[in-house]
């Protein structure tokens, strides 16, 4: 019954996505009179640049409105729900502020790399004049942004007919650079380099700073996202054969070219960006759970130099790693025999290692070298007495 139900849900989602694909050009989210893919340093400091940001302002405004509406509806449900109404009249319980854990060097480096790379991918070519022709990296970095330092693999992988029109040398460089990044980094490109990942992490930081309760991530949530992920993968692969354009669905179109000063029309991509912002606010890295390019890269995880290792003898089965994982990888918690617990969905963000309270129970490695290891001392650093 469960498998039949999943098949039906998958078919329904496929039909919905097919309808979106059919009407992608019929119902644009925001359409410029003429698409302009030219940018300059002077343009970044002109009124014309603000005009290119209009669709982004609309997306941010609608996302903020959606977040406020969801929070308000949640409070309304708590008042009207019979199971919780008896608590609504009581005085709120004073919450003790949890001690703040000291910054972990690994996380500082990861955030620094994400910020620097997002800056280079959006304005690098424009500000520094550095471009690596035909060198591609497998992340959702918008190909319409002609000022990037490197190209994005996603465009040509979903437009194979255009790829094979290039000179043979460019095709070889494309596949060579893409495979090199996949083998060397795997889905670490998602956790360290992808601008969409940075945007979602920023939304999660905003939620924690505002002390807003997020969505309780559990198996039901991840099971519901699985059919959507497969449909996105099928859409990504299928459109290149039937002549469609996956860029009309990619939320990266709503940020990278527009921030670089390009007038780029948005279609379903604009709506998906709102979904990514709202979803990323309540559930960390929500879009990464359905990202087609990320999953395709993850299929080669066995060849990646980055691994998540587990010492099963040190594990106390507390489940902190599973709760911290934004991708909902349960085997990292349930595995009791294997050392290597790397999966296709792992983005190497290190959150599982950070939240593990047992010394050396979990570690993130590169080519066998430990980059980050779980430490009880790091967990307890927030409880250390303050020096007078």
Image (spheres, rainbow, N blue to C red):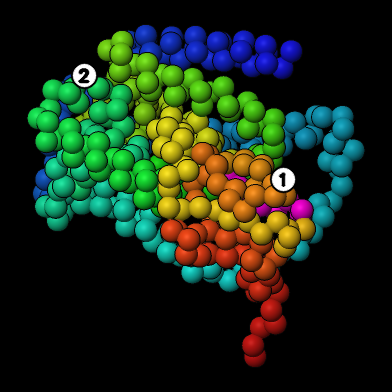
Position of residue 297 in the picture relative to residue 309 (left or right):
left
Q: Out of 363 and 253, give the one closest to the viewer.
A: 363
Q: Which residue is mark 1?
A: 334
Residue 323, magenta (yes or no)? yes
Q: Which residue is mark 2?
A: 161
Position of residue 40 in the picture relative to residue 140 (left or right):
left
Q: Secondary structure at mark 2?
A: helix
> Which is nearer the N-term, disc 2 or disc 1?
2
The residue that appears at 77% across and 35% down in the rendered structure is 78
Which percent across, then down, holds residue 4?
Answer: 67, 11
Which stretch appears magenta? 317-326
Residue 311 is labelled as: none
Q: Residue furthest bottom?
A: 388
Q: Name above or below for residue 87 compared with residue 253.
A: below
Kindly check if marks 2 and 1 are in contact, taking CB atoms under 8 A apart as contact: no
Which percent across, then down, holds residue 9?
Answer: 61, 14
Which percent across, then down, holds residue 135?
Answer: 20, 43
Q: Out of 174 and 205, give the one closest to the viewer.
A: 174
Q: Secondary structure at mark 1?
A: helix
Is residue 207 visible in the rendered image? The answer is no
Label 2 and label 1: CA atoms lie apart by 44 Å
**Quarter holding the N terminus?**
top right
Callout 1 crowding tier (Cα within 10 Å): few <14, some 14–19, many ≥20: some
Which percent across, then down, holds residue 260?
Answer: 22, 43
The residue that appears at 51% across and 39% down in the rendered structure is 344
Q: Name above or below for residue 49 compared with residue 106.
A: above
The residue that appears at 47% across and 42% down in the rendered structure is 301
Callout 2 crowding tier (Cα within 10 Å): few <14, some 14–19, many ≥20: few
Position of residue 49 in the picture relative to residue 302 (left or right):
left
**Quarter holding the C terminus?**
bottom right
The residue that appears at 57% across and 37% down in the rendered structure is 68
């Amino acid at each position: 019954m469960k498998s039949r139900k999943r098949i039906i849900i998958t078919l329904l989602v496929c039909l919905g996505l097919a309808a979106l694909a059919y009407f992608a050009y019929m119902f644009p989210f925001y359409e410029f009179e003429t698409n302009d893919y030219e940018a300059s340093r002077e343009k970044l400091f002109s009124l014309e640049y603000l005009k290119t940001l209009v669709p982004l302002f609309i997306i941010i405004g609608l996302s903020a409105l959606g977040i406020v509406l969801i929070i308000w509806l949640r409070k309304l449900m708590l008042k009207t729900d019979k199971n919780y109404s008896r608590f609504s009249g009581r005085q709120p319980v004073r919450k003790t502020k949890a001690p703040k854990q000291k910054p972990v060097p690994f996380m500082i480096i990861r955030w620094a790399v994400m910020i620097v790379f997002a800056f280079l991918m959006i304005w690098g070519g424009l500000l520094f004049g550095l471009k690596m022709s035909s060198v591609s990296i497998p992340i959702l970095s918008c190909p319409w942004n002609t000022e990037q330092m490197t190209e994005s693999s996603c465009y040509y992988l979903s437009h194979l007919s255009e790829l094979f029109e290039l000179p043979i040398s460019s095709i070889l460089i494309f596949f060579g650079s893409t495979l090199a990044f996949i083998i060397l980094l795997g889905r670490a490109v998602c956790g360290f380099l992808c601008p969409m990942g940075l945007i979602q992490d920023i939304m999660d930081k905003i939620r924690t700073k505002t002390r807003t309760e997020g969505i309780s991530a559990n198996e039901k949530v991840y099971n519901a996202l699985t059919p959507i992920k497969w449909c996105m993968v099928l859409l990504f692969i299928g459109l290149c054969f039937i002549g469609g354009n996956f860029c009309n669905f990619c939320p990266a179109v709503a940020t990278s070219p527009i921030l670089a000063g390009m007038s780029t029309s948005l279609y379903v991509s604009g709506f998906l960006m709102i979904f990514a912002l709202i979803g990323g606010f309540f559930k960390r890295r929500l879009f990464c759970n359905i990202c087609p390019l990320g999953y395709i890269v993850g299929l080669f995880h066995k060849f990646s130099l980055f691994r998540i290792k587990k010492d099963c003898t040190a594990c106390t089965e507390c489940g902190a790693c599973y709760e911290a994982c934004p991708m909902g990888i349960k085997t990292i918690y349930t595995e009791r025999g294997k050392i290597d617990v790397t999966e296709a969905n792992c983005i190497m963000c290190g959150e599982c290692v950070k939240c593990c309270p047992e010394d050396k129970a979990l570690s993130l490695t590169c080519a066998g070298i430990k980059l980050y290891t779980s430490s009880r001392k790091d967990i307890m650093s927030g409880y250390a007495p303050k020096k007078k």
